[in-house]
Amino acid sequence: LNRRLAEFGTTIFAEMSALAVRTGAINLGQGFPDTDGPEEVREAAVRALRDGRGNQYPPGPGIPELRTAVAAHQERFYGHLGVSCDPDTEVLVTAGATEAIAASLLALLEPGDEVIALEPYYDSYAACIAMAGGTRVPVTLRPDPESGSYALDLDELRDAVTDRTRLILLNTPHNPTGTVLTRDALAEVARLACERELLVITDEVYEHLVFEGEHLPLASFPGMRERTVTIGSAGKTFSFTGWKVGWVTATPELVGAVRSAKQFLTYVSAGPFQYAVAEALALPDSYYTGLRDDLRAKRDILATGLTDAGFQVFRPSGTYFITTDIRPLGFDDGFAFCRTLPERAGVVAIPNAVFYDHQDQGAPFVRFAFCKRTDVLNEAVTRLKQLA
Ligand code: PMP
Ligand code: GLN
């Protein structure tokens, strides 16, 4: 293994899901729903397979039906904010958001370029920046026990920009903290990007999972259309994480650049699923609000349960994750806590330290996923209460 990758080892999600399988514990670690997405979307995939649509290489940028559906989705949800995109030149279908992140970084970074990312960050960011030869510059979101949420210090963000900064890798709603960046914060990111001529890759895979406030795409802010690569995922929006269908929207120039990298990573993404996701994106508003309302109720169950079990809970405004502080329970090392949690309580969670460069900052925090059936969440809470 080369030096660029050596520090990353095995992703925590694989490690923790294997631990859940081995111990039979309830898996609130890796973020995947335990019920599949809509029946009619599954049927659409079956139909595509049976009718022979997409069983051979689909077009490199993605099938036209899906590119059109992505553009229509952007228009439908964000058109009132001035967002629009041309399905032929401004949309690229990827193998999940993961490939979109990798291809964007590989396409846009020169070796030695600095990339600012909000810490704690989704684990593929660090590895992909390294694979692209970039240098990551973390800006840490600070937990505020008073408000029970995390905040971005805009001065810290501003100070992190140097002459070597090429881009900001943003994520809102934010995994793992559940923070939804405010209009003011996003406006400041936009101002900074324009002022310092930075690109922004914005990972908005949880765009529809916002429980308080609203999701604002960074691309809708003044001056950002030309410098923003926006990433979405059918895994998150339709609960098909196994399908690995994601997309990038950006200007023709940026999409062209990302496509140059993507064509040599996977060439194309799985054909039949693209047809099904095209249909999914056109589901009525009630699907999207239903998903959000269902997850909000689950958030409340798990947040209340974890609080009752003695955790300090940072209540997420978005995503399907809850970050907790384990110190009230008498622990301060999230790694040790998570490694023994299956045998002590029959539950698997993720130590937030894996999402940090400044590991000490992340040590006492542990993430739980609530995209699970209500009975599963209730059982997990019952078990976790025995810890106290
Ligand atoms: N970005 C974030 C912030 C995520 O949480 C995830 C999934 N856990 C991804 C990207 C990857 O998405 P996909 O499964 O579509 O590759
Ligand atoms: N995005 C999911 C999470 O954060 C898992 C992704 C993965 O397993 N790579 O838990």
Image (cartoon, grey):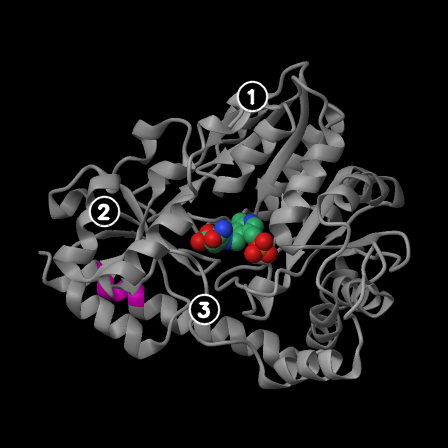
Disc 2/disc 3 C-alpha distance (Å): 22 Å
In the image, is residue 376 above or below residue 259? below
Point out the tag, 3 or 1, that comes first from the N-terminus.
3
Sequence-first disc among 2 and 3? 3
**Foreground label between 3 and 1:** 3
Whether 335 is drawn above or below 63: the answer is: above
Q: Which region is colored magenta?
A: 302-306
Residue, disc 3: 33
From the viewer's perspective, is the residue at label 2 or at label 3 nearer? 2
Please tell me which residue is depicted at 42% across the width and 28% down the height of the picture: 357
- Residue 294: give x, y in percent of width and height: 45, 76
- What is the secondary structure assignment of the residue under circle 1? helix
Q: Which residue is mark 2?
A: 339
Residue at (15% x, 41% y) in the render: 331
Q: Nearer the viewer, residue 319 or 340?
A: 340
Q: Is mark 2 within 8 Å of ligand 2?
A: no
- Disc marking residue 144: none
Q: Principal SS element in the magenta part?
A: helix
Q: Amino acid at mark 3?
A: Pro
**Mark 3 nearby-residue class (10 Å; few <14, some 14–19, many ≥20):** many
For mark 2, give the secondary structure.
Answer: helix
> Which residue is at the front of the view, 78 or 245?
245
| Dot label at residue 160 | 1
The secondary structure type at the circle numbered 3 is loop
Please determine whether, in this image, residue 33 is positioned above or below residue 8.
Answer: below
Q: Position of residue 44 (x, y in %)?
A: 70, 82
The kind of residue tagged 2 is: Arg
**Residue 100 is covered by the magenta coloring:** no
x%, y% of residue 375? 29, 79
Please tell me which residue lies in front, 362 or 219: 362
Which residue is drawn at the image coordinates 57% and 27% (left, top)? 130
